[in-house]
């Protein structure tokens, strides 16, 4: 390659990488894999060095993110850089050699910790109060997202008395896999673009303008670094992890000290196996020189610290063929295209189907029936098509054409202005009717045991029910002749339907299936509007006065009750005696007033739900993670890292017997 050819290739790579950075950091819609990005970046580094084509604004010189015009910009007192990374052992050994050469000795060790696939953020505490939270941005400055970060329960708003006056924390905001999967399911049902992976869902959530909306997103936090005003030489990376936990700031339990690089290799192998069992996504391991006072001597490049490096795990992908593209109709009429795949093994499971999300996604990736494609599990839960193999071949099928009519009822499909999904708005569309009834009967709603998918399908197909209100009109002799139904099964179902009338008011609200109203929002609605009569007559401004409710939810609730058909169904439910008012339970005592509990492990006789109800009945509250603000940890058998953390922080630990004694049982 001559210099002219190198210039052309360098320009091509810079344009590609800048576009990829924009999609990854700003739009949360990546279009190439991390590994492909890293390979292109290394190629660019090599060409710039070999042909002396350096530029200060090259992607090789800059941290990938940028500040946003939507937030105030804040300067980082210490640059928040990204990490150089590698995918092989030889390059990791080279890193160790460079550290040894710069320091002139090998009197150091390494702190090895998991690398979380989330969004890097910075927290600042002054006089032990949380005063600032910011994104990494371009490494020198970031976006002030303090109000959004205050909604994350893992981040304490106040540090304990032993913390210094000024504390700077660096860490990773992330989403657990199952929470990410549920979020994407809701977004797909609501006609919105889904997120490619947990990292992008977290980054996208933190850039939202409404903290109320951010509070609805299941964002968690782990700290990975601590910067104090007066640090002495004894402050190691390991000691920082311990201090963070003492301050009530969550740190991953997976960190180790390694005296030699060979030990680092062994840990990487161990954690490469472990990562599939973790509830969150990790894309590698971070290796840091443990002695913090060597940081200045080792220095940094314009983009990376020389005292740390990331070893990236290989993404689990597989190649297979798309045999067909089918369409599913969701509860709210969303039409979701699905790739029917030749069966392939991926991350320990056999994958036969992958969601294609919406028409725009199919067009963007140019996915066609008969294509050979690369599939990957987003967050190791949801199979998705990453890209088409050899899209330039001549024998490809024509592009997939989205139908104009519903595949289930043939009604004309529509697309709302602010959505990417096509919808069927026919209220009698059979799949929608079935799914709405299944939702109504689900455990978190009316909890009608025995009313599963197959029974609902038979009831709808036989014309016995058209809406979930019709369930309360059913008679035993109408259903006992259905397939796999007999006298006893029919009676059990009738009894379960009758028992469902005891479900509390907030569960009735959730069961109605109002768009955007999940379990948490339903509970907030019940507390704010204590009867269905009140709720039916509220305005959008009334609703937006409730902390957790924004304009979209408010509009959806008002729209639902404005619909004559829905009001008729609600009236029918009322006539059948469902709970339409909030029952204000008197507290059994206020022994736990102002106290915060965390539950972990399996209790001998109480389920987690029962224990939570008892805590609330006696004035307490529960949280998901242990921090300096936790008062008690209620621990059972197989209690894990939460118990360990409680002991480190000196939080009181109770077993079930202690707990029952405290409440007088």
Image: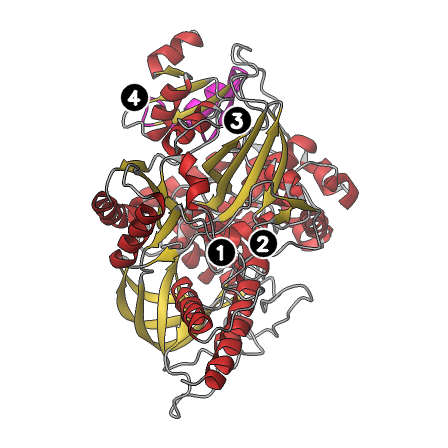
176 displayed left or right of 261: right
Residue 371 seen in this snapshot: yes
Residue picked out by circle 2? 138
In percent of the image, x 70 and y 36: which residue is there?
546
Q: Earlier in the sequence, mark 1 or mark 4?
A: 1
Range of the magenta residues? 601-625
The question of residue 272 being in magenta is answered with: no
Image depth: mark 3 or mark 1 in front: 3
604 displayed left or right of 556: left
- Local secondary structure at mark 3: loop
Q: Earlier in the sequence, mark 4 or mark 2?
A: 2
Residue 111 in picture, x, y percent from top left:
33, 38
Q: Earlier in the sequence, mark 3 or mark 1?
A: 3
In percent of the image, x 46 and y 24: which residue is there?
612
Q: Nearer the viewer, residue 660 or 491?
A: 660
Q: Nearer the viewer, residue 107 or 656?
A: 107
User: Which quarter of the image is occupied by the C terminus?
Assistant: top left
When the figure is inspected, residue 177 is found, relative to residue 243, above or below; the finding is below
Q: Nearer the viewer, residue 243 or 440?
A: 243
Residue 571 seen in this snapshot: no
- Where residue 538 sits, quadrant-wise, is top right
Q: Earlier in the sequence, mark 4 or mark 3?
A: 3
Residue 405 in picture, x, y percent from top left:
57, 76
Residue 230: mark: 3
Measure the C-alpha gap from mark 3 to mark 2: 26 Å
Q: How many marks?
A: 4
In percent of the image, x 64 and y 50: which residue is there?
208
Residue picked out by circle 1? 435
Measure the C-alpha gap from mark 2 to mark 1: 46 Å
């Amino acid at each position: 390659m001559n210099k002219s050819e190198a210039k052309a290739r360098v320009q091509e790579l810079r344009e590609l990488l800048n576009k990829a950075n924009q999609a990854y950091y700003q739009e949360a819609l990546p279009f190439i894999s991390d590994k492909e990005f890293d390979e292109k970046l290394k190629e660019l580094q090599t060409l710039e060095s070999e042909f002396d084509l350096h530029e200060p604004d090259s992607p090789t010189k800059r941290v990938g993110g940028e500040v946003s015009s939507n937030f105030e910009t804040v300067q980082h007192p210490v640059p928040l850089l990204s990490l150089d990374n590698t995918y092989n052992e030889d390059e990791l050994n080279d890193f160790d050699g460079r550290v040894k050469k710069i320091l002139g000795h090998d009197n150091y060790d390494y702190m090895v910790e998991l690398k979380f696939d989330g969004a890097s953020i910075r927290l600042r505490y002054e006089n032990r109060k949380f005063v600032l939270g910011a994104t990494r941005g371009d490494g020198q400055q970031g976006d002030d997202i303090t109000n959004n970060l205050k909604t994350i329960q893992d981040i304490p708003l106040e540090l304990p008395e032993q913390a210094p006056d000024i504390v700077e924390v660096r860490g990773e905001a992330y989403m657990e896999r199952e929470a990410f999967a549920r979020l994407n399911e809701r977004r797909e049902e609501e006609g919105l673009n889904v997120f490619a992976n947990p990292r992008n869902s977290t980054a996208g959530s933190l850039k939202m303008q409404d903290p109320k909306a951010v509070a609805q997103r299941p964002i968690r936090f782990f700290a990975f670094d601590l910067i104090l005003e007066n640090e002495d030489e004894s402050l190691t990376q390991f000691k920082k992890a311990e201090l963070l936990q003492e301050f009530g700031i969550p740190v991953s339990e997976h960190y180790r000290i390694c005296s030699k690089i060979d030990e680092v290799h062994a840990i990487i192998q161990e954690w490469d196996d472990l990562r599939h069992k973790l509830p969150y996504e990790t894309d590698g391991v971070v290796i840091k020189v443990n002695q913090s006072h060597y940081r200045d001597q080792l220095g940094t490049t314009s983009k990376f610290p020389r005292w740390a490096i990331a070893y990236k795990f290989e993404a689990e992908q597989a190649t297979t063929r798309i045999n067909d593209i089918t369409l599913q109709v969701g509860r709210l009429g969303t039409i979701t295209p699905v790739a029917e795949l030749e069966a392939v093994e991926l991350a320990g499971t056999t994958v036969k189907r992958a969601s294609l999300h919406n028409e725009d996604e199919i067009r963007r990736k140019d996915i066609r029936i008969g294509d050979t494609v690369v599939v990957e599990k987003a967050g190791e839960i949801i199979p998705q098509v990453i890209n088409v193999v050899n899209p330039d071949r001549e024998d490809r099928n024509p592009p997939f054409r989205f139908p104009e009519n519903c595949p289930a009822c043939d009604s004309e499909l529509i697309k709302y202005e602010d959505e990417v999904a096509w919808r069927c708005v026919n209220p009698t569309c059979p799949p929608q009717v079935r799914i709405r009834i299944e939702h109504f009967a689900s455990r978190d709603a009316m909890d009608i045991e025995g009313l599963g998918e197959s029974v609902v399908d038979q009831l709808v197909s036989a014309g016995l029910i058209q809406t979930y209100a019709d369930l309360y009109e059913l008679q035993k002799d109408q259903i006992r002749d259905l397939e796999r139904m007999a006298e006893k099964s029919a009676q059990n179902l009738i009894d379960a339907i009758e028992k469902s009338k005891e479900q509390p008011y907030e569960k009735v609200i959730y069961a109605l299936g109002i768009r955007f109203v999940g379990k948490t929002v339903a509970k907030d609605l019940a507390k704010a509007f204590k009867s269905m009569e009140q709720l039916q007559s509220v305005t959008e401004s009334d609703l937006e006065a409730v902390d957790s409710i924004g304009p979209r939810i408010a509009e959806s609730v008002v729209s639902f009750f404005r619909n004559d058909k829905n009001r008729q169904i609600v009236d029918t439910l009322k006539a059948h005696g469902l709970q339409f008012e909030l029952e204000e339970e008197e507290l059994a005592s206020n022994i736990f007033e102002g106290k915060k509990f965390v539950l972990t492990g399996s209790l001998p006789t109480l389920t987690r739900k029962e224990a939570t109800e008892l805590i609330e009945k006696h004035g307490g509250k529960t949280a998901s993670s242990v921090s300096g603000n936790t008062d008690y940890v209620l621990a059972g058998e197989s209690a894990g890292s939460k118990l360990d953390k409680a002991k480190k922080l000196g939080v009181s630990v109770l077993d079930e017997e202690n707990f029952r004694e405290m409440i007088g049982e």
